[in-house]
Image (cartoon, rainbow, N blue to C red):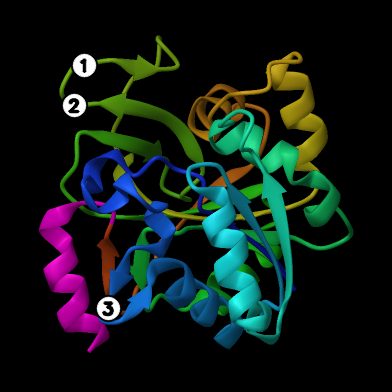
Amino acid sequence: MKAMIFAAGLGTRLRPLTNDRPKALVEIGGKTMLELVIHRLAEAGFDDITINIHHFGQKIIDFLEQHNNFGLNLHISDERDMLLDTGGGILKARPFLDGDEPFLVHNADILTDLDLQAMYQSHIESGAIATVLVKERKTSRYFVFDSDYRLKGWINKSTGETRPTRFVHSKGMHELAFGGIHVISPGIFEELERYSQGQAKFSTTPFYVDECHKLLIKGYVQESPYTWLDVGKPETLKEAEDLVK
C-alpha cells in the first residue's frame, strides 16, 4: 500500500526550532515528527512511502539513511529547487504514487491515532476520487459538505469569502475542518494536470472546491473518538510530548 508524507514545509510557525532543521525533524518525546508518522503508516499497512523534501532536505535524506529507511520502501520527491505546495507536490510525486490502487497522503505535522486503514477502506467503498479527513473543530476555514458528506464548497469565516463564489450555505450542510490527511485515487493525476494548466505550484484545496461539482470528493468523519493534534505550532508541542510519552 502506498502513502505520501508532506515534509517539505518551511516550518515558520516553529521558529527558532526550524532555523537549523526541517519541521519534520523536530522531536516530540524523543522522536521526530517524521518518524512518528512513518510508524503510524507502517502499523496501518502502508509499506511504500514517498516523502517530499525542500527546507533542509538533505537532513531528511540523511535521517532516513541512518535508520535504514525504517525497513520500508521509501522514496524521496525532491522539491529543493522549488516548493510546490500540496497539489504540485502530489503531481511531482506521480512516478512513485501512480498505479492501480489509491494512496494516502499525511501531513508530517499531524499527530493522530485515527484508524487510517478504516479511512482507506471507506474511500474505496465510496468510489470517490478523493476522501479528506474532516471533523468539527474551531478554525477560520471550513470545507462544506452535503448530508452525504459530498464536498460542495469552502468558506472562510474570518473574511466571509466562499468558494465557489456563488456558493450558498443551505439547510443540511456541514461545515467541517480539514485534518491534514487524504486518500486519493490515481485518477486524480489527469485531473490535476488539467487543472494546473502547466503551473508547477498549486494547492489541493482550491482544486477540490473548484472541481467538486463534477468530481466525487468525500469527507471522512470517524464516529469513534480519536486524538488529533496539529503539532506544527509551539502551543501544541507540549501537549504532543505528553501524548507520545
Q: Are marks 3 and 2 in contact (CB under 8 Å)?
A: no
Three-letter residue code for mark 1 = Gly
Frontmost residue, 195 versus 198: 198
Please tell me in which quadrant of the rendered image residue 221 appears. Answer: bottom left
Residue 87 drawn at (x, y percent): 61, 34
Which residues fall within the magenta stretch? 232-245
Q: Which mark is residue 42?
A: none
Q: Amino acid at mark 2?
A: Lys
State the quadrant of the C terminus. Answer: bottom left
Drawn side of residue 231 relative to residue 187, left or right: left
State the image quarter where residue 65 is shown. Answer: bottom right
Q: Residues within 10 Å of mark 2 (few under 14, many from 20)?
A: few
- Residue at position x 49%, y 39% in the image: 151
Q: Which residue is mark 2?
A: 157
Residue 37 appears in view:
yes
Label 3 crowd bin: few (<14), some (14–19), many (20+), radius 10 Å: few
Picture coordinates of residue 37 (x, y %)?
A: 47, 72
Location of residue 77 in the rendering, given as x and y in whole percent from the top left corner:
70, 49
Distance of mark 2 from mark 1, alpha carbons? 5 Å
Q: Secondary structure at mark 3?
A: loop
Q: Residue furthest right?
A: 100
Q: Residue at x 59, y 66 (%)?
A: 62
Q: Is residue 5 above or below residue 171?
A: below
Considering the numbered disc 1 on the image, is that residue within a helix, a strand or a loop? loop
Secondary structure character of the magenta stretch overall: helix
Q: Does 179 lie within the magenta span?
A: no
**Residue type, numbered disc 3:** Pro
The residue lying at 60 percent from left, 23 percent from top is 201
- Please give the label number shown on residue 160: 1
